[in-house]
Amino acid sequence: MNYFRTAMLLAGLTALFMGVGYLIGGASGAMIALVIAAATNLFTYWNSDRMVLSMYGAHQVDRSTAPELVGLVAELAGRAGLPMPRVFVMDEIQPNAFATGRNPENAAVAVTTGLMNQLSREELAGVIAHELAHIKHHDTLLMTITATIAGAISMLAQFGMFFGGNRDNNNGLGIVGSILMMILAPLGAMLVQMAISRTREYAADNLGARIVGQPMWLASALVKIDGAAHQVPNYEAERNPATAHMFIINPLSGHGVDNLFATHPSTQNRVAALQQLAAELGTRAAPSVGANENYPPRGPWGRSSSRGSSRGPWG
């Protein structure tokens, strides 16, 4: 049902895009707009991961620079039946994470230093499993496409406002219709984009909890991240709000109209769904991550205050 709903929403977004192109330039305008969007999608297909990772100043780590983090990602990727993704760390105080890449073979998982510093190993495992679920569901490509189409709709609407629409069409738009198109088309695209994002978050929560084997680990992490996201600003995300849907929790501060257009389901609803899943799994839950390893109770990131550091144990 989630995949069907996502497909319908994506189809609606595409139809809206074609409709805006038609209102601006008739049938030829719709075709030109489609060609432009296709070219943009092709570019983002090959370069979206490098663009967003560079935007957030993420640096790649390996077993020599972040052995515990990379080892945890490798263990969870093995459980999920995925190739080992590249692992990146963002020097950002706000705890958060996202996944990117056009397919599982070219995927990357990025976490902030704040996430590693403030979460226990179990909670971090839940977050990483959630991001791996996005990769397994090919959500990273889907969200790139929806963001691109939504951006194209906004661009076309502004173009139509500037030129007053296609005056050769007998559609009766006029200047009033052009103004309405400029306002309503981007708004509709935004709503569809966010509906797709919310649908995929629930699916990733469910699969991620199954990968890690303990739904409440992810639930606990979501509560912590959500609380911090409203207190600790992510300035890069504030400058690039179009990327907010990529993170496990909306990184925007939520001031002003942001609350009206949530890119994620409410954390309370997500936790409730995870609680229900935990009850369903019961004793059938998978073994805890690292259950056979000699890890401290909270892992290397659950350090005492005497080891306080903004960058954590990875340096």
Image (tube, rainbow, N blue to C red):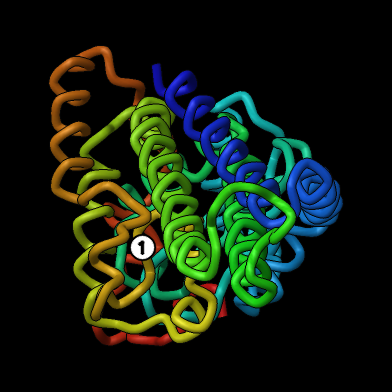
Q: Is residue 63 above or below residue 42?
A: below
Instruction: Give the answer, above or below, for where 273 lies relative to 106.
Output: above
Q: Position of residue 108 (x, y in %)?
A: 66, 52
* Quadrant, the N terminus: top left
- Viewer-proximal residue among 289 and 193: 193
Can residue 175 be seen here?
yes
Query: Relative to the observer, which residue lies in front, 47 or 8?
Result: 8
At 77% from the left and 55% from the top, the residue drawn is 44
Using the image as rendered, state which of residue 38 and residue 56 is in the foreground. Answer: 38
Amino acid type at circle 1 is Asn
Depicted 279 relative to depicted 241: above or below = above
Residue visible at 70% across and 53% down in the picture: 86
Residue at left 33%, top 86%? 308
Q: Quadrant of residue 275?
A: top left
Q: Is residue 270 left or right of residue 150?
A: left
> Would residue 261 be found to the left or right of residue 272 on screen?
right
Is residue 42 visible from the viewing direction of this image?
A: no
Q: Position of residue 201 (x, y in %)?
A: 39, 41
Q: Could you say where residue 302 lies in the image, as x and y percent from the top left?
A: 31, 66
* Quadrant of the image containing the C terminus: bottom right
Secondary-structure class at tag 1: loop
Badge 1: residue crowd in 10 Å (few <14, some 14–19, many ≥20):
many
Quadrant in the picture for residue 30 = top right
Of residues 173 and 188, the one drawn nearer to the viewer in this rendering: 173
Percent x, y of residue 284: 26, 12
Q: Badge 1 is on which residue?
A: 250
What is the count of numbered marks? 1
The residue under the point 21% across, 51% down is: 267
Instruction: Left or right? Give the position of 284 relative to 106.
Output: left
